[in-house]
Amino acid sequence: NHHYFIILIAMLLLILVIFLWHKKKSFKPALILIPFILMFFLIRDNSEKIVMMDVGQGDCLLIQSKQACILIDGGSSSEKQVGKYRIRPFLKYSGINKIDAVFISHDDEDHYNGIMELLQNQIKWSLNIPFLVMPNVESKSEELVNIQKAAEQHGTKVIWMKQGDIYKKDFLLRCLSPVVDISYIDKNEYSLVMHLQMGQFDMLFTGDMTERTEKNIIENIEECEVLKVS
């Protein structure tokens, strides 16, 4: 909504400048450019982008396109209340009040504790998170169960993702891991591994996958411009 407000102000300024110039003839025609300069600097870029937020020791990546805005992870082991003091301010600055889906790669705190803050403060922070996506593993840890409960208590639907599942908007996220019929030893092994296709751009998100997981999926990994290293 702030975009429309800025455009409206710019249009009113343009009308005012034209009017004054017409009445007094002393205004230089170049002044007409002022509203357009304001629009250029003030209207935020809504083009496709990927932002890697500075959350200290941890992960938080935002993917924004014309159709959707998603987060992949959001946590830190070095910054206190990273949701409140790092993630939320960035979302607010960017004019984002709806995150179409949040993906938590696995249940290490430096990947999810900021997301927990977002989930629990949706009403207070005027934030809407309709879907939370987590790795589909047979034996779910206490942390995964607690995250699920927190999400559902605050009106967010939980989806469990596995190899072969996709998330599609005007970009495509294809899940490469976890694999349902594999028994995983620790939480890093069952990290969500996802291949992003956004036009001609490809990126691989790996969570904290281990060497074993890498060997299990290496044949399914396609060429990418960017690798988010585990």
Image: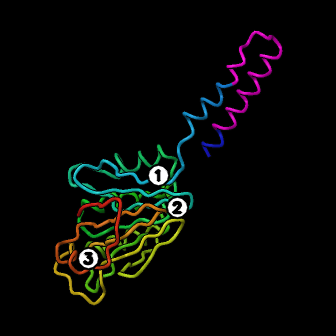
Q: Which mark is residue 125?
A: 1
Q: Amino acid at mark 1?
A: Trp
Asked if the residue under mark 1 is in contact with the one under mark 3, i.e. CB atoms within 8 Å, the reply is no
Q: Secondary structure at mark 3?
A: helix
Q: Is 50 left or right of 193, judged from the image as shown?
A: right
Quadrant of the rendered structure where residue 230 is?
bottom left
Q: Which mark is residue 68?
A: 2
Q: Amino acid at mark 2?
A: Ala
Asked if the residue under mark 2 is in contact with the one under mark 3, i.e. CB atoms within 8 Å, the reply is no
Direction right: furthest residue: 23
Q: Choose the circle earlier in sequence order: 3 or 2.
A: 2
Q: Nearer the viewer, mark 3 or mark 2?
A: 3
Quadrant of the rendered structure where residue 215 is?
bottom left
Q: Pinpoint residue 184: horizontal percent, then vertical percent.
A: 20, 82
Part of the protein shown in magenta: 6-32
Q: Secondary structure at mark 2?
A: loop
Q: Is 120 left or right of 67, judged from the image as shown?
A: left
Q: Choose the circle earlier in sequence order: 2 or 1.
A: 2
Q: Which mark is residue 218?
A: 3
